[in-house]
Structures are given as structure tokens and as C-alpha cells.
């Protein structure tokens, strides 16, 4: 594939080659991308028919996310073949798979050496990579900051905490960059006005869906509403996760649900 003169010698050069591969608008490159994605033979006829109908574009134009995955896979396989990434560690393939999620995030953080060396090559201009050690240091500073807050602030629970608007905290910088609604107002984060009546209606509607009788099994793609239940501890270590009043409302709601259930008949 490569001669000694033109072989990629850096991960950046390998990434450039992988980008070029998925942008080529020709049959062999499109076929190669499908092979790279391990697309089964059964749907390929339909895929090729659509590809031809669209004017035989590159996979990057026809299916951007598939092209991203193919780029990651091409990059990894080529880097391993050139000895730029070790092929002796089985975990490397699994670690590279995390890059498949890159299009759906704004901040990617990791302490993994492979991620540190590769993720920045795949980032868009509106994304950042944060080394895990830097984030860990910043979170330690935030722990110290919030530990010094008054008790009434701590009682609200960490789900209501916001990083300090002023200061050189990494988390604050990321919030300002990626949460444009988190605007300054007299040096403090702006608060959105709340409408208790509107919020109560939303909660009631959600609960009505979540507590409705179960129907026959259906595929998630055909469902009009899907509820995923999560249980959170009230406290973890020294930190309160949710406010006490929130926890008490949840407990009271669960108690009322139990009381509404008809008594089970003792079959014995």
C-alpha cells in the first residue's frame, strides 16, 4: 500500500489518510468503507442502489456518521499495521471504540494514553479534549469550594450546585463555553423564572405515563413514550445528592401508590 517514502509516519498523517479514504467518491472506496464497517451482505444491494441513485457520492456525503466510524476504524487498523499503535494490547481496540461517540459530545475526557494521543485528531472546532488528570484536579478544587459553603446551600444537594461563575476553574470555563444560557447577571449565573403551575402539570403528565398499565411488548422505535427509572441515593459520603424536601416528596408519592394498590388475596 505504501512505499518507504510515502508511508505515514505520525498519527496525524494516518488520520489525514483515513479522512481522504472516506471522502473518495468511487466504487472501490465505497466498497472498502462498507467492509471496514462490517456491513452484512444482505443489505448491500439496497445500499448500492441508493448510492447509485444519489449519483455515487463518497460515504462521507451519503452517510456522515457511518463515515466517521469508518474513519476511526481505518485510522486504527492502519496505525496498528504501521506500528504507531500497539497491536499487542487487546484493550486498544475497545478503547478506540469510544471515539465512535465523539460526534455526540462537546467535551471528551480521559486519562488513557491512547485517547490522549488520538482523540484530539478527531475533534471538531466546537469540541475539546480534557485530560483526566486536569479534570480530577479541578474537581478536587470544586470539592474544597463547595465544602466551605453554608449549610443551607449544602442542603439543596449537589444536583443543584453550579460551579463558581468567577475564578479560574476548568469546569467554569467549560460551562461558559458550552452552556451559553448560563449567562452572567451581576456576577452570578442567571436564574430562569419558574412557573409552579406549569411544572406541576408536566410532572403530573409524566407520572400518568409512567404509572399507566403496561401493554403488550413493542419495539422502542414504535413507542410514543418510554420511561427509564433511575434510583439515586439521598446521600453519598459527605454529600447530599438531592434536597431533603425532594426526597420526602418522592417517599410520600411512593407511599400513596402503595396505599392505592388493591390488597392481594391470600391464596393460602
Image: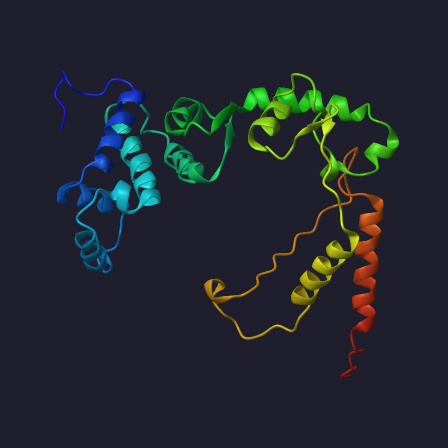
Quarter assignment of residue 43 = bottom left
The residue that appears at 66% across and 52% down in the rendered structure is 230
In-image side of 231 versus 14 (left or right) = right
Q: How is the image coloured?
A: rainbow
Percent coordinates x, y for residue 76 in the rendering: 31, 32
**Farthest right residue in view:** 151
Name the residue located 31 percent from the left edge and 21 percent from the top edge.
12
Please determine whether, in this image, residue 179 is positioned above or below residue 34.
Answer: above
Q: Quadrant of the N terminus?
A: top left
Q: Closer to the camera, 80 or 16?
A: 16
- What is the total number of numbered labels drawn onto the structure image? 0
Does residue 33 appear left or right of residue 179 in this picture? left
Task: Answer with the quarter of the image where residue 169 lies.
Answer: top right
Q: Is residue 103 left or right of residue 19?
A: right
Q: Position of residue 115 (x, y in %)?
A: 43, 27
User: Which residue is nearer to you in this view: 225 or 141?
Assistant: 225
Q: Residue 195 location, x and y as percent? A: 76, 50
Point out the image quarter for the C terminus: bottom right
Q: Is residue 18 left or right of residue 149?
A: left
Residue ID at (59%, 33%) = 179
The residue located at (49%, 63%) in the rendering is: 220
Q: Position of residue 224 (x, y in %)?
A: 54, 65
- Between 85 and 183, which is closer to the camera in this rendering? 183
User: Relative to 121, is 27 above or below?
Assistant: below
Amino acid at each position: 500500500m505504501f512505499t518507504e517514502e510515502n508511508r505515514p509516519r505520525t498519527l496525524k498523517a494516518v488520520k489525514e489518510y483515513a479522512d481522504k479514504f472516506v471522502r473518495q467518491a468511487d466504487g472501490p472506496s465505497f466498497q472498502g468503507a462498507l467492509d471496514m464497517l462490517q456491513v452484512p451482505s444482505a443489505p448491500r444491494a439496497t445500499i448500492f442502489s441508493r448510492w447509485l441513485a444519489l449519483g455515487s457520492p463518497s460515504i462521507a456525503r451519503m452517510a456522515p456518521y457511518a463515515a466517521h466510524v469508518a474513519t476511526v476504524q481505518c485510522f486504527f487498523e492502519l496505525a496498528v499495521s504501521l506500528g504507531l499503535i500497539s497491536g499487542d494490547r487487546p484493550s486498544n481496540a475497545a478503547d478506540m471504540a469510544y471515539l465512535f461517540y465523539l460526534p455526540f459530545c462537546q467535551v471528551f475526557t480521559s486519562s488513557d494514553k491512547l485517547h490522549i494521543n488520538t482523540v484530539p485528531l478527531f475533534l471538531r472546532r466546537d469540541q475539546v479534549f480534557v485530560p483526566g488528570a486536569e479534570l480530577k484536579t479541578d474537581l478536587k478544587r470544586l470539592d474544597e469550594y463547595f465544602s466551605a459553603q453554608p449549610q443551607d446551600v449544602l442542603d439543596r444537594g449537589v444536583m443543584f450546585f453550579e460551579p463558581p461563575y468567577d475564578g479560574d476553574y476548568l469546569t467554569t470555563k467549560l460551562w461558559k463555553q458550552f452552556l451559553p444560557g448560563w449567562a452572567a447577571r451581576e456576577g452570578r449565573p442567571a436564574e430562569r423564572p419558574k412557573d409552579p403551575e406549569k411544572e406541576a402539570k408536566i410532572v403530573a403528565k409524566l407520572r400518568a405515563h409512567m404509572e399507566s398499565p403496561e401493554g403488550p411488548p413493542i419495539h422502542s422505535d414504535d413507542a410514543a413514550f418510554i420511561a427509564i427509572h433511575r434510583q439515586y441515593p439521598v446521600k453519598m459520603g459527605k454529600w447530599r445528592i438531592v434536597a431533603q424536601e425532594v426526597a420526602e416528596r418522592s417517599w410520600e408519592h411512593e407511599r400513596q401508590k402503595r396505599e392505592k394498590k388493591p390488597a392481594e388475596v391470600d391464596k393460602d
